[in-house]
Image (spheres, rainbow, N blue to C red):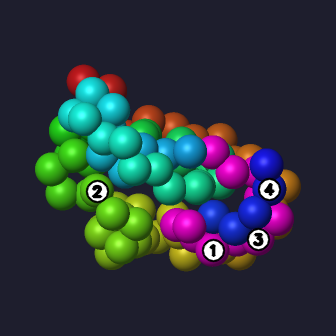
Amino acid sequence: MKGICELCGRDDVVLTAHHLTPKEYGGTETAKLCLPCHKQIHALYTNEELASRLYTIERLQHDERIASFIRWIRKQPADRLPKIKKAKRQKR
C-alpha cells in the first residue's frame, strides 16, 4: 500500500504499520510509516524507550535523535531505501 508517511510526510511511499507503543507493552494503535522511517526508529530506540516516552508521532518528530534523519529523508525520492545501521548503544 502506498500513501503519505505520518512521520516524514513523504508521499507515494510504501507504508508499514508501526505500533506507537510496542506490542510487548500492550500497544494496539499504529501509525503508517515509510520503511526507512520505521527502520530508523527501531535502529535508534529500544522498545522500552518507545513505550515510555516516544509513543506518539509528535513526540518522535520532536526527538533530536530522529529529527535530523527526518529532515534528510524528506529530501529523498520516494523509492529511495537507504541502508539503516543500528545505533551503537542499541547493539549492546
Residue under numbered circle 3 = 11
Magenta span: helix, strand or loop, mainly? Answer: loop
> Residue 43 versus residue 4: which sits nearer the camera?
4
Q: Amino acid at mark 3?
A: Asp
- The secondary structure type at the circle numbered 4 is strand
Name above or below for residue 46 compared with residue 57.
above
Task: In the rendered structure, find residue 55 and report the number of the disc placed on it.
Answer: 2
- The secondary structure type at the circle numbered 3 is loop
What is the distance, in whole Å, between disc 2 and disc 3 at their CAs?
23 Å
> Where is residue 76 shown, x and y percent of the image?
75, 67
> Residue 42 versus residue 91: which sits nearer the camera?
42
The first of marks 2 and 1 along the sequence is 1
In the rendered structure, are the residues bearing label 2 and label 1 in contact, judged by CB atoms less than 8 Å apart?
A: no
Residue under numbered circle 4 = 2
Q: Farthest residue in the front direction?
A: 28
> Where is residue 68 shown, x and y percent of the image?
46, 70
Query: On the rendered structure, is 42 left or right of 92?
Result: right
> Residue 41 versus residue 86: which sits nearer the camera?
41
From the image, state whether disc 3 or disc 4 is nearer to you.
4
- The secondary structure type at the circle numbered 2 is loop
What is the distance, in whole Å, between disc 3 and disc 1 at their CAs?
6 Å
Residue under numbered circle 1 = 9
> What segment is highlighted magenta in the picture?
6-16
- The secondary structure type at the circle numbered 1 is loop
The first of marks 3 and 4 along the sequence is 4
What is the distance, in whole Å, between disc 2 and disc 1 at their CAs?
18 Å
Query: On the rendered structure, is 69 left or right of 56?
Result: right
Q: Amino acid at mark 1?
A: Gly
